[in-house]
Image (cartoon, rainbow, N blue to C red):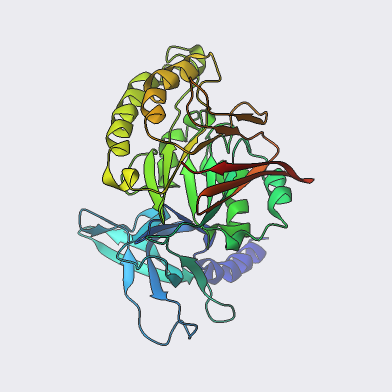
Amino acid sequence: MKKILSALLGIAAPLLLTAQIKITHGPWLCDMTSTGVTVVWATDKPALSWVEVTEDHGKSFYQTEHKRHYETVAGRRQAHKTLHAIRLEGLTPGTKYSYRIFSREVVEWKYNDAVKYGNVASTNVFSRAPLHFTTFPATGDEVSFLVFNDVHGRADLMSRLIKDENLRSYDFVAFNGDMSNSVESREQLFKDYIDTAVKFFASEVPVMYNRGNHETRGRHADLLGEYFPTHSGNFYQLYKVGDTAFLVLDCGEDKPDSDIEYGGLADYDAYREAESEWLRATVSSEAFRNAAARIVLLHIPLGCGDWHGDLHLDKLLLPILNEADIDVMFSGHTHRYAFHEAGEKVRFPIVVNDNESYVRCRVTKGKIHIETVGTGGTTHTHEITIR
């Protein structure tokens, strides 16, 4: 028996020594602007990772040598991670790029940065075309995008909804909250929706990420920003796609901070107050005021509910948005479709998507065309005249 065991170990040892590092999830794109984008992926072992990118001229990716873009913190390249997020900046607006990701395994790290590297894993550009993305245009009336919300970890539903959609024809896909029930682990996030997004679009069409109230919960929730990093470090953002401005607003939780469900961890009243101050300054900025169309993504719809979170959002954000000439807001949260016309309390229309559909939206000169789409096809349509 001992001889057999020794023989098996002798066979297995070289296999273990030569095991390849693997890219286990991704890549996916997020935080797209007209001049930059962040590329995120995961490996099974710690690695020094980089991205190579070039304008797509229809020629071989390896016609010339490309600069390596690393994730750096305070001048130091990161080599201890298995989740890699690399920001590409200095890109040209409205331009198609090809890219490839690389991760070199760190097999040993001794005193004084005596690092020993192993094998390299990368995306394939030899037997298949390299991955692509197109930066947001700096100007222009036309924008197209999809909105998902309240998937709650049902990756199978997400797959059924989008399997026939030509996703690469859109500028971006928005995740507008509650894509998970809670954030408990890395593997749960991948299983809930990230892997499905990568399979269908997210390696080439960027995600515009917005947090919902359920994604504030769970032992892994504090790390959520590592999966969808932003150049400002905040979940709430202003994005410009051509001449259209998108306000991505974070709702926080829906019950009082003292609620027993939050385990003493919630401090969302103060968080929303800080967000409202940012919003007040942002809607006064030149970038927002000069926009031809103004669209808001907020998971909890304004002016519709009577829970603490709803009322606090109404108190802080609604007065600012009512004076900001908003054309439409996209929300979810209620799990029921609704369309709220502009009125005295809320001076802009709100599309509330249900938990069995996604929203298809195209902005053209003077109009916003909206469809909600379920597994059976289009269910509701709206056409909004831009102010």
Give percent across and percent down for residue 82.
Answer: 43, 54
Image quadrant in which you'd find residue 181:
top right
Q: Is residue 234 above or below residue 134?
A: above
Give percent across and percent down for residue 356.
Answer: 71, 37
From the viewer's side, name the closer residue of 76 and 274. Answer: 274
Give percent across and percent down for residue 214.
Answer: 54, 29
Q: Is residue 65 above or below residue 85?
A: below
Q: Residue at point 54% right, 81% down?
A: 126
Hey, which residue is sitting farthest right in the picture? 376
From the viewer's side, name the closer residue of 308 and 64. Answer: 308
- Locate the N terminus by quadrant: bottom right
Q: Is residue 352 visible?
A: yes
Hey, which residue is sitting farthest bottom in the picture? 63
Q: Residue at point 54% right, 48% down?
A: 367
Relative placement, left or right, of 22 versus 106 is right
Q: Is residue 267 visible?
A: no
Relative placement, left or right, of 259 versus 167 is left
From the viewer's side, name the closer residue of 78 and 231. Answer: 231
Give percent across and percent down for residue 280.
Answer: 30, 31
Relative placement, left or right, of 31 versus 172 is left
How many marks are shown on the rendered structure? 0
Q: Residue at point 56% right, 34% down?
A: 178
